[in-house]
Amino acid sequence: MTDPTMPTELNTPDADPAIAQRVAAGDVEAFAVLVRRYARPLSAYIAGRIGDRHTADDLTQDVFLRAYRSLSRGAFAGAASLKTWLFTIANNAVIDHHRHRARRPKTTSQKPAHDRADAASDPAHLTEQAEQAERARRLIAKLPDAQQQVITMKLLGQLSFAEIAEVLGCPVATARSRMRYGLMKIHEQLMTDTEQEVAR
């Protein structure tokens, strides 16, 4: 996404290094460009991993806060791309979130994300979308964590396999394999669910 108020060099697809340098130098406007560029895919990825878009928004803000602190300290060395570096932070935030939830007593007060949706939306359409999203989330949640990571980064975070491999520290072929086997398992589960529905 381009920003007409920023210099041309920050509006190109390969502007990330320049943005990182400006943020490190204390340029708040450059950081705003960074947020606008990556907030949506990061939030989509996190929501896909945890199944709650409101908590995902909070975690996305936390990711940018961590990134800003690191960039301000000059901790971003540029060995990875800024995009995959942000997704690495996001992946760690998801892992921390799951660990925290595992240690916390379960309650029944937390409603599913679709129950907190905007009431101004068309109810029938909203319900159908929510049911589809929830079904997809449940299917992905049944996969091994390694396959969940790849599928959500690819489909929701819109990362390439090369970028996914960089985030996870694995070969590109491994990322592709995890995606393939994960989708195969989802397909098998969908077939099983369909057969059960027909049998009823």
Image (spheres, rainbow, N blue to C red):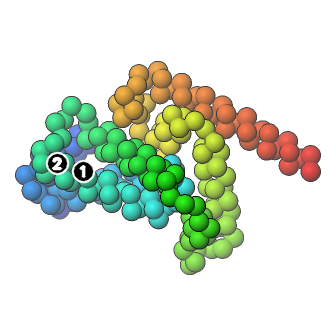
Q: Residue at the location (66% across, 31% down)?
A: 184
Q: Is residue 177 above or below residue 13?
A: above
Q: Residue 71 carries which label?
A: 2
The answer to which of 188 and 18 lies nearer the viewer is 188
- Tell me the residue that label 1 is attached to: 67
Where does the image place residue 101, in percent across and percent down from the top left? 50, 55
The reply to whether the C-beta atoms of the residues labelled 1 and 2 are less than 8 Å apart is: yes
Three-letter code for the amino acid on which mark 1 is drawn = Ala
- Mark 1 → mark 2, Cα distance in angstroms: 6 Å
Residue at the far right in the pictured view: 199
The answer to which of 50 and 161 lies nearer the viewer is 50
Write down the quadrant of residue 3 in the picture.
Answer: bottom left
Characterize the local packing of mark 1: few (<14), some (14-19) or many (20 or more) Cα atoms within 10 angstroms.
Answer: many
Write down the quadrant of residue 59 in the picture.
Answer: bottom left
The answer to which of 55 and 97 lies nearer the viewer is 97
Q: Is residue 11 above or below residue 170?
A: below
Q: Residue at the location (41% across, 49% down)?
A: 96
